[in-house]
Image (tube, helix red, strand yellow):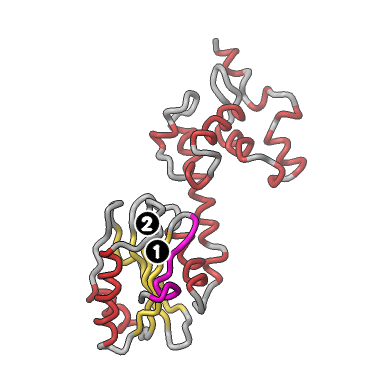
């Protein structure tokens, strides 16, 4: 029985089927998603090679790596052949990828001149979340980013927004412009009545301190909604 399991280990495959060797010889860009995951897990199960198992895992999330990254260790362990160590390896690798993306284009943005700039700055942090978070971008009078902060973190149903905390932080930073943002894990881009109410509440309160609410973004995995662009700010 052990010999049958071992035969599915990558080191026992034919040279043409070895993703590790393929990566070394041809470069990582030529490998499929399944081959990259197969390298992480090293072996399959009694019936499947590592690549076959990886393909099945990917099929369960419609071949979407962002969706795969949302699976917990326990969810990954539901696949035959994926124990805790392999599940942890997959989860850790996808988190590294997410953080690498977060340190890419978004971190290069130092000035926000459009809703797209704000989205690009925030998406690496918020786009893949399964729970709702509320973030603030604080800008100076040249629209340069002073700081971006997570204001609150909540369940899928919503977050709590402390208006006093938002404005106190703005005053401490010397910020004259604020961009509000929160994500909708459900994927819907339509603002709720609560979204509109908190935007209005923050706008009224900030105007008394000569601080301008420049926009409020709703961020999803694939797109965003801008209050300013839609003329409802």
Asked if the residue at tag 2 contacts the one at tag 1, i.e. Cβ–Cβ closer than 8 Å, the answer is yes
The residue at the point 53 percent across, 62 percent down is: 103
Horizontal and vertical percent position of residue 52: 60, 27
Foreground residue among 177 and 50: 177
The rendered magenta stretch, by its main secondary structure, is classed as loop
Magenta range is: 222-231
Q: Residues within 10 Å of mark 1 (few under 14, many from 20)?
A: many
**Image vertical order of residue 211 relative to residue 29, above or below:** below
Q: Give how far across and how far down residue 157 sits, in percent.
A: 27, 53
Residue 29 falls left or right of residue 102: right
Quadrant in which residue 40 is drawn: top right
Residue ID at (40%, 34%): 75
Identify the mark at residue 184; answer none if there is no mark: 2
- From the viewer's perspective, is 90 left or right of 32? left
Residue 231's quadrant in the figure?
A: bottom left
Query: Quick check: is 85 in the magenta stretch?
Result: no
Secondary structure of the residue carrying numbered label 1: strand
Q: Name the spot of residue 110 as percent of width and height, x first.
A: 52, 76
Identify the image quadrant of residue 77: top left
In the rendered image, residue 226 lying in the magenta stretch gets the answer: yes
- Looking at marks 1 and 2 on the same chain, the residue that comes earlier in the sequence is marked by 2
- Report the residue at 38% width, 34% height from top: 74
Count residues near mark 2 (Cα–Cα under 10 Å), then give few for <14, some for 14-19, many for 20+.
many
Query: Which label number is shown at residue 88?
Result: none
Residue at image position (53%, 43%) is 64
Along the line of sight, which residue is nearer the eye, 192 or 10? 192
Element under disc 2: loop
Q: How far across and down, in percent of the image, does residue 24 sit?
A: 73, 41
From what the image shows, is residue 120 above or below residue 187? below
Q: Which residue is mark 1?
A: 218
Alpha carbon distance from label 1 to label 2: 7 Å
Between 60 and 5, the one lying in front of the other is 60
């Amino acid at each position: 029985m052990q010999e049958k399991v071992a035969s599915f280990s990558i080191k026992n495959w034919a040279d043409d089927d070895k993703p590790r060797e393929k990566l070394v010889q041809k470069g990582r860009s030529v490998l499929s998603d399944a081959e990259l995951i197969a390298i992480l897990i090293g072996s399959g199960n009694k019936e499947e090679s590592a690549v076959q198992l990886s393909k099945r895992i990917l099929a369960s999330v419609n071949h979407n790596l962002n969706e795969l990254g949302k699976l917990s260790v326990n969810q990954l362990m539901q696949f035959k052949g994926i124990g805790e160590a392999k599940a942890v390896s997959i989860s850790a690798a996808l988190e590294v990828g997410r953080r690498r993306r977060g340190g890419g284009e978004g971190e290069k943005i130092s000035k926000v001149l459009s809703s797209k700039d704000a989205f690009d700055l925030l998406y690496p942090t918020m786009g893949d979340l399964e729970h709702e978070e509320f973030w603030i971008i604080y800008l100076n009078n040249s629209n340069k980013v002073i700081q971006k902060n997570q204001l609150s973190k909540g369940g899928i149903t919503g977050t709590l927004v402390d208006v006093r905390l938002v404005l106190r932080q703005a005053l401490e930073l010397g910020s004259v412009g604020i961009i509000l943002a929160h994500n909708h894990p459900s994927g819907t881009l339509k603002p709720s009545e609560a979204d509109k109410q908190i935007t209005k509440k923050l706008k009224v309160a900030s105007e008394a301190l000569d601080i301008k609410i420049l926009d409020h973004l709703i961020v999803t995995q694939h797109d965003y909604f801008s209050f300013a662009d839609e003329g409802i700010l």
